[in-house]
Image: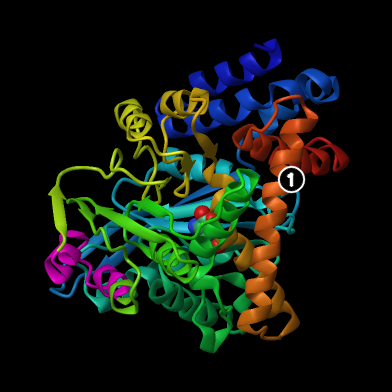
Amino acid sequence: MNAYLASVIENVKTKHANEPEFVQTVEEVLTSLEPVIDQHPEYEKVDLLNRMVEPERMFTFRVCWMADDGTWHTNTGWRCQFNGAIGPYKGGLRFQPNVYPGIIKFLGFEQTFKNSLTGLPIGGGKGGSDFDPAGKSDSEIMRFCQSFMQALYRYIGPDVDVPAGDMGVGAREIGYLYGEYRRLKGAFENGVLTGKGFSYGGSRVRPEATGYGAVYYLENVLKHEGESIEGKTIACAGFGNVTWGICKKAAQLGAKVVTLSGPDGYIYDPDGVTTKEKIDYLVEMRASGRNKVKDYADKFGVEFYPGEKPWGVKVDIIMPSAMQNDVHMEQAKKIVESGAKYYIEVANMPTTNDALKFLMEQPGIIVAPSKAVNAGGVATSALEMAQNSERLVWTEEEVDKQLHQIMNTIYQMSVDAAEKYGLGYNLVAGANIAGFQRVADAMMAQGIF
Ligand code: GLU
């Protein structure tokens, strides 16, 4: 391997030994940049890569909140402003008990490349808390969000850093967060958050955007193989907002999602999550806070597999859409045995590096990376920012059209970038290279700091 690249990876491994998720994403991304670094000695000359793997800044703050029974609780909050070279920091907030700085940094690093790929002016950021929203009442969630924003508001702004949702943070949380921001600032600066409700500046199609974007990207991949999405079966994971959007768009286009998963196991619905009743029920399941996919099996009388993952079920397309490191080597082997031809990552880093490499080496499988596939969410957030700053509201058709175009462009840019560096049809490396190039150009132009 290129000696400079190897030394940067080594630095990160040493420095972040206690943050394996961050090391994993840095290794995955940097490895695929090898031909670029070989051909551009100017990056090594100014040690660009060690700057790229170091967040510009990261805040840690205390978040105290009162439970309904009057007891007080203390959590930690974080916001990482990873890279602002191409625009205000942009990326979601994740509320989940397993959140710690390693998760926030991995997501912030991924976000930097993903946001760059959208072609829109957004830098990379991420934040969250180790707060567990499961089983919390609505007023507990509100008090937590208010307290979180009391700490966060001084670091963000429509031209500074624009958080949004991620796991555990949906439209309800964004509403409470924005209400507190508005109260603190005494101004209607609604471009400070995206994923807002439509009544106070949210964008049409934002709730569906990640799922729709993933399907638009998938259509490009299928077209390349001379195939169409109609009649295809899809295995998804999770049952949150992203999976909901995939089910909805897939159903519109005549395909069907046949698996969903949760922490309790997975369900198999041979008829697909295709009817309005079934698709709407996903929203209800998520809102219940129970976090159990078995509810779907109970309601619609389909098979539930406790404690198992859906990888290996016979389908045409695999879309891991739940969370990081959902697919390990063991599941990757099952996927190959199942004969699925398309492995389309959706969640951030859903595949371990060894499993991803293994899948990419299989001649019969096409692999697409999450940072391209799920970029429609954040891209639509950038469209929300544009509407907010123009004090305008675009129609559903307008937003959907732009989202569709952006996904087509992301796909094409990835294809072109890999080809340019002699890597053939490699969507994974192509996305990393295309995402890198824009941030690198901007950083080089702005001088060393
Ligand atoms: N959390 C989502 C992501 O990973 C959305 C971020 C945003 O809209 O800013 O891209």
Residue drawn at (47%, 44%), measured in percent from left and top?
345
Determine whether the beta carbon of the residue marked 1 sits less than 8 angstroms from the nearest atom of ligand 1.
no
Q: Quadrant of residue 137?
A: bottom left
Q: Is residue 127 above or below residue 402?
A: above
Main secondary structure along the magenta-highlighted residues: helix
x, y (%) of residue 341?
46, 38
Q: Quick check: is 284 in the magenta stretch? A: yes
x, y (%) of residue 56?
64, 43
Residue 81 appearing in the image? no
x, y (%) of residue 315?
36, 46
Q: Is residue 159 above or below residue 363?
A: below
Residue drawn at (87%, 41%), measured in percent from left and top?
445
**Magenta span of residues:** 281-301
Which quarter of the image is occupied by the C terminus?
A: top right
What's under tag 1, amino acid-wise?
Met
Q: Quadrant of residue 421?
A: top right
- Rendered image coloring scheme: rainbow
x, y (%) of residue 293?
21, 59
From the image, tell me which residue sits under label 1.
Answer: 413
Q: Quick check: is 430 in the magenta stretch? A: no
Q: Is residue 83 left or right of residue 177?
A: right
Residue drawn at (30%, 69%), measured in percent from left and top?
282
| SS label for mark 1 | helix
Q: Is residue 163 left or right of residue 62?
A: right
Q: Who is closer to the viewer here, 83 or 113?
A: 113
Residue 391 appearing in the image? yes
